[in-house]
Every structure is written in structure tokens, then in C-alpha cells.
Image (tube, grey):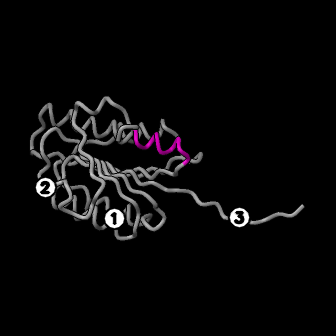
């Protein structure tokens, strides 16, 4: 019997949840949009884990969260437990989230950012993440026009705005 060493290559996906709300006070529409972003993050993470990807879930509110799932590392229940703890914030979480993500960036092949808006600080954050050449998809959960231009006015070609009417169509349509 001849045995051959073969290195396994796994696709590793980072799913990043933006928790920053726009106003210093919460209103019902902001909270509903935040809950849609959390649900979308859960759906994307679950979908990727079921496709045999290793999924790194990152989120920051008052606390920074990171969970690696897929390929028997963690399960959907653990993803949901983490997302149940995530709270919205009024301050940019990217400064606290970036060091955690940068530790794993060289191993990540794809990044899915689920943003609440498209602003200059979010664009800068996405640029930093794209330096290592990972494929990137940006999903903006928003019913109104983003603060900054989300159509071709930047180097990110794969930006999708998901409005509340599209939300129930399912993950396959994104």
C-alpha cells in the first residue's frame, strides 16, 4: 500500500457584523434594522458552515466576539449564542475589532461584511481588510440611501444593499 501525503486546503470565511447605530438614541426602525443584520449574519454564517467552509464570526458591541465554526469546530447553536449576546453600539467598533481580525487575515480567503451603513470609516476598514487579497462581499442592511456612495465610486465591486422588503427572500438571493 502506497500512502501519499496530501495537504488539505480549507476555505476560511470571515463574517463581520457591524453593530454601530447612527443616532445617539434608539428608535424602532434602527433596532429592527440591527436585528435584521444579526439575523442575516446568522444565516450567512450557517450557510457557509454547511458548505464545509471554516467560518470566523466577528462582532463587536460593548464586547468583542470571535467564534470559529464549521468543519466540526463549532455548531449553529454556538453561532446563535454569540449573536444573541451582541448588542448595538453608538461608537465605531472597527478600531476594537480590527486587531482581532488582523490576526487571522492571512488565512482567510473570503470576507463577508454586514454593515449598517456605508460611511468613510467603514470604507477604510474594508480597504484594510482587502490588503491581503481575500475576496470581499459587502452587504449593507438599510432601507434608505447609504451615507456614502455604494455604487462603483470605490474599489469594492460587490456591494449589496438589502432593504427590509428583500430580507425575507432568503440567503440564496444575496
Question: Is residue 174 positioned above or below 121 on the image?
Answer: above
Q: Does 58 sit left or right of 5 as displayed?
A: left
- Label of residue 6 in the image: 3
Specify the quadrant of the image occupied by residue 31. top left
Q: Position of residue 81 (x, y in %)?
A: 42, 37
Which mark sits nearer the N-terminus, 2 or 1?
1
Work out whether residue 62 can be spotted.
no
* Whole-number angstrom distance, CA of label 2 to CA of label 3: 46 Å
Specify the quadrant of the image occupied by residue 36. top left
Depth check, front residue: 107 or 158: 158
Which mark sits nearer the N-terminus, 1 or 3?
3
Q: Does 62 sit left or right of 26 as displayed?
A: right
- Label of residue 149 in the image: none
Depth check, front residue: 171 or 13: 171
**Which residue lies at the image location 26% right of the left edge and 59% below the top edge?**
94
Q: Secondary structure at mark 2?
A: loop
The residue sitting at the left extreme is: 24
Q: Which residue is mark 1?
A: 129
Q: Position of residue 157 (x, y in %)?
A: 28, 58
Q: Does 112 appear in magenta?
A: no
For label 2, count other residues whose C-alpha is less than 10 Å away and answer few (under 14), some (14-19) or many (20+). few
**Which residue lies at the image location 21% right of the left edge and 46% below the top edge?**
116
Residue range highlighted in magenta: 43-52
Work out whether residue 66 can be spotted.
yes
- Label of residue 148 in the image: 2
Depth check, front residue: 24 or 114: 114
Q: Does 17 sit left or right of 73 as displayed?
A: left
Q: Secondary structure at mark 3?
A: loop
The residue sitting at the bottom extreme is: 131
The quadrant in which the N terminus is found is bottom right
Which circle, 1 or 3, is nearer the viewer? 3
Amino acid at each position: 500500500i502506497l500512502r501519499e501525503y496530501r495537504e488539505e486546503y480549507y476555505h476560511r470565511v470571515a463574517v463581520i457584523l457591524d453593530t454601530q447605530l447612527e443616532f445617539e438614541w434608539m428608535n424602532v426602525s434602527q433596532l429592527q434594522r440591527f436585528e435584521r443584520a444579526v439575523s442575516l449574519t446568522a444565516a450567512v454564517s450557517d450557510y457557509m458552515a454547511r458548505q464545509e467552509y471554516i467560518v470566523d464570526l466577528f462582532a463587536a458591541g460593548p464586547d468583542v466576539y470571535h467564534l470559529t465554526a464549521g468543519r466540526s469546530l463549532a455548531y449553529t447553536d454556538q453561532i446563535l449564542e454569540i449573536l444573541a449576546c451582541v448588542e448595538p453600539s453608538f461608537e465605531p467598533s472597527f478600531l476594537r475589532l480590527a486587531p482581532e481580525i488582523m490576526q487571522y487575515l492571512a488565512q482567510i480567503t473570503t470576507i463577508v461584511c454586514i454593515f449598517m451603513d456605508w460611511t468613510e470609516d467603514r470604507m477604510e476598514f474594508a480597504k484594510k481588510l482587502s490588503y491581503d487579497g481575500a475576496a470581499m462581499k459587502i452587504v449593507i442592511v438599510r432601507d434608505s440611501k447609504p451615507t456614502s456612495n455604494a455604487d462603483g465610486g470605490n474599489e469594492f465591486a460587490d456591494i449589496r444593499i438589502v432593504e427590509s422588503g428583500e430580507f425575507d427572500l432568503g440567503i440564496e438571493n444575496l
